[in-house]
Structure formats: C-alpha cells, structure tokens
Image (tube, coloured by chain):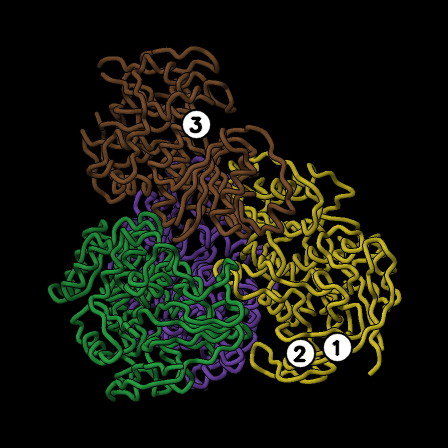
Chain colours: A purple, B green, C yellow, D brown
Amino acid sequence: MSAVRAAVMPAPGAPIELREYPEPRLTAGSAVLATLYSEVCGTDVHLWRGRLSGVPYPIIPGHVSVGRIAALRGELRDIDGVPFREGDVAAFLDVHGSCGACYYCLVAKQTTRCPRRKVYGITYGAADGLLGGWTERIWIPPGVKLIRLPDGLTPETYIGGGCGLVTAFHAVQRAGVRLGDFVVVLGAGPVGQSAIAFSVLSGADQVLAIGAPDERLQAARRMGADATLSIDAMPHAERLAAVRERTGGRGADVVIEAAGAPEAVVQGAELCRDGGVLVVAGQYTDNGDASWNVHALLNRKHLEVRGCWGCDFSHFYGAIQVQARQQHRFPWKDQVTRSFTLDQAEQALRAVEARTLLKAAIVPGR
Amino acid sequence: MSAVRAAVMPAPGAPIELREYPEPRLTAGSAVLATLYSEVCGTDVHLWRGRLSGVPYPIIPGHVSVGRIAALRGELRDIDGVPFREGDVAAFLDVHGSCGACYYCLVAKQTTRCPRRKVYGITYGAADGLLGGWTERIWIPPGVKLIRLPDGLTPETYIGGGCGLVTAFHAVQRAGVRLGDFVVVLGAGPVGQSAIAFSVLSGADQVLAIGAPDERLQAARRMGADATLSIDAMPHAERLAAVRERTGGRGADVVIEAAGAPEAVVQGAELCRDGGVLVVAGQYTDNGDASWNVHALLNRKHLEVRGCWGCDFSHFYGAIQVQARQQHRFPWKDQVTRSFTLDQAEQALRAVEARTLLKAAIVPGR
Amino acid sequence: MSAVRAAVMPAPGAPIELREYPEPRLTAGSAVLATLYSEVCGTDVHLWRGRLSGVPYPIIPGHVSVGRIAALRGELRDIDGVPFREGDVAAFLDVHGSCGACYYCLVAKQTTRCPRRKVYGITYGAADGLLGGWTERIWIPPGVKLIRLPDGLTPETYIGGGCGLVTAFHAVQRAGVRLGDFVVVLGAGPVGQSAIAFSVLSGADQVLAIGAPDERLQAARRMGADATLSIDAMPHAERLAAVRERTGGRGADVVIEAAGAPEAVVQGAELCRDGGVLVVAGQYTDNGDASWNVHALLNRKHLEVRGCWGCDFSHFYGAIQVQARQQHRFPWKDQVTRSFTLDQAEQALRAVEARTLLKAAIVPGR
Amino acid sequence: MSAVRAAVMPAPGAPIELREYPEPRLTAGSAVLATLYSEVCGTDVHLWRGRLSGVPYPIIPGHVSVGRIAALRGELRDIDGVPFREGDVAAFLDVHGSCGACYYCLVAKQTTRCPRRKVYGITYGAADGLLGGWTERIWIPPGVKLIRLPDGLTPETYIGGGCGLVTAFHAVQRAGVRLGDFVVVLGAGPVGQSAIAFSVLSGADQVLAIGAPDERLQAARRMGADATLSIDAMPHAERLAAVRERTGGRGADVVIEAAGAPEAVVQGAELCRDGGVLVVAGQYTDNGDASWNVHALLNRKHLEVRGCWGCDFSHFYGAIQVQARQQHRFPWKDQVTRSFTLDQAEQALRAVEARTLLKAAIVPGR
C-alpha cells in the first residue's frame, strides 16, 4: 500500500511541508475518503498565524472537504438508513465528537458548546491520523458522520459553499429571518456570501450586503443581494443613513455580522431597527474588544443579539439539501476562484490571506 | 371647586415647589383619581439631575401611582368589560398613548418603541395638566387605561412594587425563565427585587442576587433570593467564581441585569453559561459605554442578549394579577421604607438618591 | 351628488339586487374610495347560502377590495407617516375595529379574537353604510386603516391575491416554515394558491399541493408547487404513500390545511411527519366534525396543530409588501379568471360556487 | 454468586411469576443497581392487558426505578463529569438507546421519536437481561445514563413522582406555562398530580384539576391545585361553565390533558380560551377516536394543540433537580400509597387497575 501525501503546517509561521503517512487502518464502522477537494478557509490563515489557542501543531489543515469513499469496513449508513458504498461521494462532519453525555449535549441541547467536540484540521495533530483535508486520503473513524452529496450536487459546488455555507445556514436559522424582513449582511467573505443566499431563500424582502473589495460585492449581488455598500468607499455613518433611507427610517429587521472586525458588531447594532435581531457570527477569533453604548444600543433599542457558534449535523444536512436544490439560482460553484495542488498549499494560504481571491481549494490529485 | 396641590420640578437641579392647579375638567371617557400613593423612583432622581433628554420642564413627577376614582364621565371599562365606578381603587397605565397606527404598533407589535408613546410624570409638562402622580388629583384623559386593583391587593403593596414591579415582569418574561433555571439578578434596587420574585415564581431552581448595600441584599433574600453576593465585599472575579461553583462550572442559565452601571452588562455576559440568556433592563439612562470581547462573550459563547425597554398593558396587567395572588409570599409592601407628604417631595428625592432607603412614596393627603 | 350603486344580498338565497345609496358623508379622518375591484370569495357564497350566523342582512358583500381615494377629510397617514392624498390607490383593512381595550387586544395580543372586531361585507348591514366592496364607492370611517399599494403593484395583481393572499400569509407565518422544510398544502383554492407561493418564499425545499380540479392544480404549479396530487384521481392512502416516498418515509415537516372539508384536517395530521406542524386555516365555516385517533395522530406523533383565524394589519401589510416584490415570479394576477359588473354579481357568485373559475372580481365601473 | 429474583409477566393476562436469573455480567462502562423501588404504573396494567403492540413477552416490567450501585466496571460519569461509585443511589434513564444517527436524533432533534429508542420494562424481553425494575438487580449496559439522586432527595420521594413526574415535566415544558396563566389539568392520576405541581412552579396564577375519584382530587389539592372539579359529580358542561366563570368568560390559557379518555382531548379544547394551548399527554395507548368540530375548536378558536410523547434526558434531569428542591412543598412521597414485595407484584397490578390506590411500588428486598 502506497504512502499518502499530506500538506502539513508544522508550527505557526513555519513553511507548509509535504509529508507522507501510511494509509489509515480500517476498523469496523470506519472509512477512508479519496479527497476530491479541501477548502482553504480564513481559519487556516488564523491557524498559520497562530491566532487560535490550543492547536496541536504539527497539523494537517482542511476542515471542510469532499471525497469519494475509497474503502470502508462494516456498515455506515446515512440518516435515512441507506448504507454507504465504496465510490459514493460524501462530505463528512468536520465538527464531530460531541460527547452525548454532558450538560450541553443532553440538557441544553447546544452541542456546539460540548467541551469534547473535535474539528478536523484544527483540533487534531498530524500524529492523530489523517484528520484534516489537505491530503490524498481522509480518515473517517467510527462515529464521524458522512453526508452523501444529493444527486446533482457536484463536489465543486459543495466546496464552493464550504465552511461558510454551513456557518451561514446556522446564522440565518438563528436569526429567524422571516418573510418580508429587511436583512443586512455585514461581510462579503464566504460566510457573508452564503448568508445572503440563505436570507433570500428564507423570504427576506431585501438583502443589503456591506463589505469589500468590489469583486466580493459583485459576487454578493450574484448571490442575491439586492444592493451592496462598500466599506472602502463609504463611511459607516453614510451606510447607516442608506439603510435607514431604505427602511422608512427604522433600520434593518435583521443584521447578520459575518465580518470579523469587532467594530462590525457595534455597527450591526446601529443598523438594526429598534426591536430587531443582530446575529454575531463573524468573530471566530479574538480580534479584540468593542465598545458600545449599552443604553442606546441594547436597552432602549430593545435589541436582541444572538451569538452563533459553530454548527451541528442539522446545519450540515440542511445546508447541503438546500444547496442541492438551489445551486442553479445561486452560483456557489463560482466561489472557488482558484484550485491548488498539495505542494501549492502555502501559496493558497498566502492568496487567501491577501484576499486576492474569494476562495481557494486544495485538489490533492493522485 | 378647590385648587389641587402638586409638587413640581421646575428645572433640572432647581428646588421642588408646591404649586396649585385647577381641578381637571372631565370630558366623556375621562376620570380623575384622588391620589393615594405615588412612587419616588430612581428615574425621578435622573429627571432632577437632568439626565434625560427632551423633558418639558416644569413637570409634575410621579409615573406610577394609585388612587381612588374621584370622578368620571361617560363609560370607562376594565378589560373584562366591567365598568369603573367612583370610589374604585385603580392604577393607571403610566406608559400610554402608543398610536396604534405606526410600524411598531401594527407590524412589529413592539408598542414600547412607538415614537408617540407618552409617560406620566416624564414626557408631559405641568402645563399639559395633572399628568404626574405627585399631586392630590391625577387626570386620566380618554384612552389612558385604568387597571382595577384586584380584591385584597392593597394600594400599599401595589406601590411597594411600583415601577420596578412592571419593569421586572417584562424583563423576566423576556428572559423566558424556565422551570429549573439558575438565575442571577444583577442589582438589588426595586427592579431587581421584583425580578427575583418573578424569577422564583417562574420556576427558577435557584436565584442569586448580586448588589449592595447589605440592607438591600437582606431584602433580596426576603423576596426569594436563595443567596446574595455583595459588590461591596467581593470583586467581580470572585462573584464569577462563586456562580460557576454553584452551576457545575458553567455559569447561569439566565442573567437579568437591573443594575444600571454599564460594566454590569459585561459582567452579566461573563456570568452566563455558554448558550445562556442575558436580559439588559437596567440601562434606563445613558451611563456610558461598555467594552466587551465580542469573540469570547458573544460569538464563541453562543450567548443571547435581549434588551428590554419599558412595558405595555400586558405587563401591567400580568404583574398586578400575580402580585395580588403572591403578596403574602413576597413582601412587596415592605419595599416602601418611608412615605412623604407633597411638601417633603424634595426630601424624598434626596433620600432615594442617597440610597438611604429602598423606596419612597408620596402620600398627597387632602 | 349622484347616487351610489351597490349590489346587495337581501337575505340568504334571495336574488342579488342593485340598489342605490347616497354618497358617504365625510367626517375628519375618513375617506371614500372609488372602487376599482372587489373580490368574490368563497365566503360570499357561504353568506349567500346562509352558512354564517349573525349576519345582518341585507348586506353589501365584498370584504377585500381596492380603490382610488375619491375624497378624504382631515389627515390620514400610512404606517410610515406619509399622508394619503386623493387619487392614491389603496387597499383597506377589511378586518378592523378591534377594540384596543379587551383581553385579546391588550394581554393575549391576538386581536383576531377581539369580540368587537368588524369585517367589511360580512358583519355590517347595508343600513350601516357603504361598508362592503360590491359598490361604486366604499366608505372608510375614521380608524379603518388604509394601505397604499406599493409602486408597481397593480390593483389587478392585488385583487388576484385577494382575501386568500392575506389568510395564507398568516397561515404560513403561523406554520413557521423554515429553510429546507417539506411542505404540503391541502386545497388549491385562493388560500392554497398563495400558501404555496409564501411557502416557497419562506424557503421550503419542496411544496406539494393536493386538491382539485386539474386547472387549479396547474395554477398551483405556476404558483410554485413542485408537484401536485389530485384528490379526484388518487385516494388519500395513495397520496399519503406518495408524500412518504418523497420524505424518506417520514411525512411532511409542515402541512397547511386550506381545503375546507373536515376530513382534510385528519388527512393533514396523517401527512405530517412525527413532530411536524399542521396549520388549520381552511375550516372557515362549520362543515361538521372530524373523527381522529388522538393517540396515534396527536400524542404518539408528538404533533403540533395550530388553528389560524383571520388576520390583522401585520398580515395585510406584510402580504402586500411581499406581493409587490414577488409579483413577477408568482402569477397572482392570473388568479382572477373573470371580472363582472355590479349587475352581474349574482352570476359571479354562481360561477364561484360552481368552481368554474378560480376567482372572480366585481368591477363596479362608473 | 447467588441468583437474582424477578417478577415476570409471561404473557398478556397470564399470572405474574417469580423467576430467577443469573447476576448480570459487567463489561466496561456498565453497572448493576440493587433495586430500592420500582414503580407499578398504569402502563404496566396496559402491558398485562395486552394493550400495547410489539411487546416481547415474557418481560420483566418496571420502567422507572431507583437503586444503589451494587457494582460497576470502568468509568461511568454523571453529566457534570463526576464519576459514579459503588453505593451511590441513582435513577436510570428508562427511555434510552436513541440512535444518535437518524433524522429524529440529528435533524429534527426530537429524540423521543427515534425509531431505535428502547424502554426498560416494555421493549425488552426477559431473555435480553435484567432490563426492567421488578427484580433485585437491574442491569445498566454501557450507554444507559444514570442520574445521581441529588442530596436530600430520598428514593421514596423519587419513586413517588415516578414515571408521571418526568412525563409531566415534559408536558408542562411543552405547554410553555407562563407567569400568570390559568391552567387546567385533566386527570388526577400520577401524570396529572405532577403536572399540577410543575404548573404551579412555572408561575401559573391558578391551577384547576379535573378528575376522580375524590381521594385523588384531595391529593391534587395537596399537590398545589387551587381547586378541583369531580368528573363523577359534575357533567362536562358544568365544568366548562365553572372554568369560564373563573376566567372572565374566556377559558383557560393552558389545558394539560393527562386523562387518557379520548373525549378528554375534545373537552380540553373546549376548556381552552381562544388562542390558548392544549397539550395532549394522556393518550399513551389507543383508547379510540375522538370526534371534534374542527371549525369551532381549532380554526375559529385559533387553538394550539401540542401532542407530547415520552421524554428524553433533559426531562429526567430537570424533573429530578426540581423535585429535589421542591419536595417539601409538594408531597410526592405520599403518592406511593402502598409498597409490595416481588411476590406481591400481581396484587400490586390489580390494585393499580382497580384504582384503589394512587400509586404502588415494588420493593424487591434482599
């Protein structure tokens, strides 16, 4: 059995290296995917820059990936009970391992806060196995859920949505977007792009996207935004005035923050109408504090602010089903503006960091 | 017809004056109350110190009051359709005049954000009529709702709850306190005191109150708090540790902020467990900004923060019904620790400001 | 001032008559509409057949209508505060007069159950004034809300939606349709047609419509149904099997009953998946009892059944805004398959009763 | 190792027999409880009378039990991560084995509808092991959750609540009882008794219990009912009138059906106010159909009917925590009106069937 090549991040700041690993050994209920695509996400840049704590370097990055089942042992079934077979194209639940035994799993029913939860490409070291996507083979140990790509959903389209697709699905669901709402999406990166599409699909009367650069705003309009405002070209006060003008002076019913800068949270609160809803989904890493007037923006405004962390199976499953049906209306597949081979992984990271492309994917080949 | 005496606040900082006004003239659907009690609330101190904007001084303060119907013209009915009669003891809806014609009244159904809403003792000038409670007679123009005190609910007990009773009812309802929740109430003033009682009544497993001074914490325990922590005696980090110790290391399911200091909002977020709920009800005036880490406290924590502004008829009605049934279990009547006559109104204000008593009431006599 | 012609329903079963009335006299805050279109709805057939109780015959039918403001006195404003002017095209809130003073208006906040609520064309006698739409002029007394048709929304499209548009908006909102849901709509009449469109707009993954006759099912597909099943061609057991086959054996997440026959409620419960939601919106008149197995269909199924009565301003407002934006995607305007003059009103009733057309409108001319 | 005695139900209608089984063999993560109490529930009568389908007779009945950990292997922890030790007193989750892999577990998040779910004493045959409570030793295989009885909660009190405690907790939570609600509980058996207590604890303004016989109604008052009505002494029309009289003519905000007779569901709908909530929790077995007027009781009434099936860990956990804190206010411990030894199990069944006692418990001794 030949060795498996993987792109490894040895330590924060260190050059990405190609290393070789043995094929995973299969136990009952486990599988191996032949990687088709693995996403290069903003989080991977954070990992490379050492902005997340507790990461067991060296790691094999790549938390959202799609592959073909190269081998499986025993019985793996999808949620409808249909068994997986070799050759099936499947995504896997990068966020997994919630324990099913703690307060968050069993009482609060908020499994994304389970302390034992694991994430491919982030919480595993390379020594733990092929548990990241920047490699030719991905190991699916027993208990990691696979989701079969529905008929007609291509791997390209799925990876075009990527991590942002699922995060956005959760954020829009948590926002409770309703028929007729005026929605503002802050941020035009991958999460923002999918948040626009899911807001439109949830019945938003209008979706306004705020971000930069211009190519991302153009993409936002293709993903369904009725209008876009550029943070490069227009200061916040003018953006606020523009939103109020479109909403009878009131502000947005719902704002989804997918921007990342702490001040975006405060701006989001200002853009909401009184009694509106602000979802905070973009503060995945610690970019510092934000200072707000809690009288005007929370209390008097009767605002509802909902933090939104991670995702669970329901978000993966729902996002994929919806994407499969709506892929012709929303051009997720165009979001991967460039693919890279394993030995170009560092180049991919640098391009994502420089924002010279909307999204990159690793195509391991073999 | 004899003149009506009122305690008037001529301008921010100016001495309170006794002035005389003519009896209100009755039109169809209106009434006059002979004041039994009118509350002296923290908001009255804010008014006196000029901390609220747009107040049409001189004003007759007193937004929550109770009186006996001295006169009425035409037909006034309660919500069950039973007509009011002279001699009935009734509270009135200090917050009223929502227009029934705007977006907030009709579409958002959040009438506390109706821009035309009026409040007795705050948004009316003395020139508008006897539309505040620090007077012998209170004018009830057509459209202002009266609520009959239920059998057995004394005016003393009702005014003991006062403005805080209704605000707390709204806050606890907005918190969605559920059977078995661990609740922290920040602030041991009148809103906090009633928030404790309503949290207990809503099924909280434990209610922990945090505030000062000690007499207020003693009162908090009489109102149902299982335990209290003093902000004078214990720094926030220790209070946080104490809450975590009582909650399996997780933090509170629900925190109700009724404290007023902006940092209480941030502390409240820290005291919540992941996925918990923080209601912000204490930032009634602008006490400045608060700086938070939006990554750790909102996004990763999956927190829900709910601003809570004012109240509507449902909160008045609900709070009074519950108070009537529960008055023997929770000593609202003891919250008025001193009554003052009209010509002692300034003295009452100074006492409330100095926090030398929990709550003061004006008893206009005649 | 010339007389106003109206089509009057003198009594159940009696021929519709043309009668003449004086122009309405305007008081401050009132208006008169020159009728453009008034709907002929299934309810009008019920009125004519005497199936509703407490109707003050003779009446001028027509509860949903649209007209041009022919005259107004004083100031009438829309919910954004913009004044209405003569010549504006506006719809009016047929369901109005909720009292703002009872338990349902103030505490339960379910104004559609206010006992004092009035409905144009149903709860008024012709002696009360021109308070129905089958007439050249409609009286808008003070307090009846007008809604300006948004730019680009034609009166033809609005009346194509008609009463069903607003009822369906409420039903879909009450159903809480979410992104990815599988929705079944029972009934292909006007309520069902709009329920299909609003379900699609709310993010339903698939919408299946069940009804008859075939022309209505064709219309249902044009309104967005992914598939239709004919109750004429297929027994319920087969329809149930077909729904289960499309849903992994489980049944629909949401069923919206807009059919009218009592057995449709039971069939709706069977079509739901365990833990699903059934909205009952079609039982507007008493068509008799339905017998269910409450163990299997409610308790063990963990089903949620939500009755849905009438509508309030928020549903009118929301439905019109959404319709204006979505009119090119969903052919509401094609639902009026024939217009009738005032003297053809009885002919219109007979056509609606015979279901020889999907919807009829009265065009009073003048 | 000595043999373990168990009371076995060989087949529907057959005499209960004492049989002997070997001690369970322990694998890692499993435990054995020395039974202290096992409930004799109405469901056990149903089992004996053959009213449930798919039961693998012979069975060892007893789905809710409490015992002392006699032996364990490996590490078992509670949800706070604290390890269980021999000698600890613990309840176990009778309803368990939801698969964590199906649509209901992962997407709908309604695990009580998971098709693979198992129940002690009902879905296991005696051949499967000591998986019922009417025995000296109860087997806890890996994956079955244990809940430690909190300090001060005696096994007597816990078993006094029993199966009804947890079912009622779920029902009251699903009802969403809110501060100030008027609640009617239909049925005065064990589920009804706990539903009364939990409704009171959730802030119900008044709780009215309807049932029979008189001793159960007396117990209902001790469990917190403000008033009771006897179905033996008063026909439904009079009970309806009595509820309306107490609620301003409107009816109850919430009705919890815990009665079992199909007509109780219809009566519950009639007892609700317009826009109220009816929870159906009592139709655990198929007692036949109920016929309703779906126009008057669902559609026009704008009613919400919520079926409520089974329970999950959150209900067990929540119910036990609340019971521990509230045991001195609500006399759960008095609900077991008689205890029986293993060889008296049939006698216990007959007593429960005859309703000569409120609840029976098996005390296996040894």
Mark 1 or mark 2: name the one nearer the start of the chain.
1
Of residues D135 and A131, the one nearer the viewer is: D135
Q: Position of residue C27 (x, y in %)?
A: 67, 80
The residue that label 1 is drawn on is C24
Circle 1 packing at 10 Å, graded few (<14), some (14-19), many (20+), is some
Left or right: residue C118 versus residue B285 is: right
Q: Splitting the image into 4 quarters, where does residue C197 fall?
A: bottom right
Residue D213, label in figure: 3
Of residues D152 and A84, the one nearer the viewer is: D152
Q: Chain of mark 1?
A: C
Mark 3: secondary structure:
loop
Q: Which amino acid, by three-letter code, is at mark 2? A: Ser
The residue that label 2 is drawn on is C30
Q: Are marks 1 and 2 in contact (CB under 8 Å)?
A: yes
Mark 1: secondary structure:
loop
Q: Quadrant of the C terminus of chain A?
A: bottom left
Mark pair 3, 1: CA separation: 64 Å
Mark 2: secondary structure:
loop
Q: Splitting the image into 4 quarters, where does residue B1 fall?
A: bottom left
Left or right: residue C109 versus residue C208 is: left
Q: Position of residue A334 (x, y in %)?
A: 54, 67
Circle 2 packing at 10 Å, graded few (<14), some (14-19), many (20+), is many
